[in-house]
Image (tube, rainbow, N blue to C red):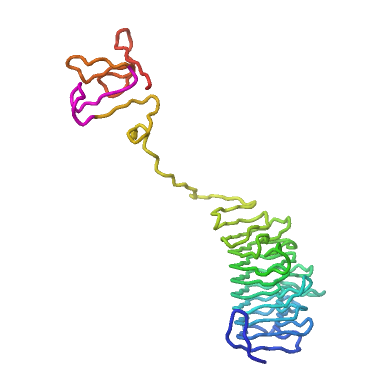
Amino acid sequence: MSQSSTAYYGNPFTTITGLAYPMIYENSEGSHDDVMTGFKITCYQPYQVCLYGDQDTAGYGPTDFTFTDVSLTSQGESNVYVQKSGFGFFFLRGAWNNTATDFSSPTAALFTDNCGTGQSMSSLSGIGYTVYTQVFGGMLVDTCGTTPGNPLAHWTFSELLDESSFVPVLRVNTYYGISNTDFNNVSYADPSGGVATPIIDLTNASAVAGIRAYNVACATSLQPVFETNSTSAEGLTVTNDTQGCAIMGTNYGAVRGQATQIDDYLSWNQRLQNTSHIAYQMSLPAAPASCVVRSGGSVPAGGAVRFVRAGGNFGFGRPGRAARFGPGRARRPRSGRGDRLRRPGVHPTLSGPRAPRPGPGSGRVMKTPL
């Protein structure tokens, strides 16, 4: 043992190395409610696993482990972390590093079950959380052709950094797939396997439900969030920020673009029930054109132009009375009625047009637009 430092954590802690296969072993029958803090475990032997959570023949696994500032490192020939079944796995900071050299290298983490004959498979591991954890080499869900009763479920990867990997952050190769799993602010950096390596590979997953990716950061503009097959994926939800991924890689799901301010629904429907509704707030309408003539507006055809003078009769009529103007022929003022102008379509004494009265000689008032 010696003193060293760990990923995302600079304080001294204990380094463990040795020849044990695996280095740290979780027994499905007797391992539970354990805590490890401040360890760097290095596995230099070929195919040596640093942390191994086993499963018994009945399909049960270990439960309730908390790892704080625990870093696992192998030499590229083995998984550093293997978890079979069980529930309650909590990782704060630390790292999973398998020192991968090419595409054939095992992933840093493996979630699986018993693959031999005569085994019982109950479920894959569930209720797991990683916070500020670094991964070098990606993660794999693989049940080697078996069909456990439940998929990998109820995992949350928060602020996870996958760096210098040849493979996706997570690849799923199991019949029941994955469900109810969140990827919060996951970042992919310095890819070794190509600029189009997906963040989450669901190609070999027959069932997918409830995967949520919030603000996932791709390393390149060609890197998609997902790689999927023709199976309808249920519940893929992506929230993409300005530094997110430009390619979704799926035809199913809902994508919220914070930068574009657009929601995309990929083969999804929307439904409003009970008293739900969608509303759009309209702006106030502009004033009618005939009310803003003096501000440069225009008068629609068929209207009447009027103004009220403050005082004076401009040579005719009584002060304070409204005068009407239009393209019709104006008559000269008559004695006693100097304020009245007559033109076709406008009654000389009323405030607007009116219908002609029937019969000959009835004033011949016509409604004529301006």
What residue range appears in magenta?
Answer: 309-328
The x, y position of residue 110, in whole percent, is 72, 74
Farthest residue in the left direction?
A: 336
Q: Quadrant of residue 43?
A: bottom right
Question: Residue 292: percent from the left, percent from the top?
Answer: 34, 35
Q: Is residue 219 magenta?
A: no
Image quadrant occupied by the C terminus: top left
If the image is split into quadrants, where does the N terminus sit?
Answer: bottom right
Q: Main secondary structure of the magenta part?
A: loop
Image-based side of 77 in relation to 266, left or right: right
Q: Quadrant of residue 121?
A: bottom right
Give how far across and how far down residue 324 sits, in percent. 28, 23
Q: Position of residue 46 (x, y in %)?
A: 79, 82
Residue at left offset 68%, top offset 56%:
250
Q: Residue furthest top?
A: 360
Q: Nearer the viewer, residue 202 or 328?
A: 328
**199 or 265, nearer to the observer:** 199
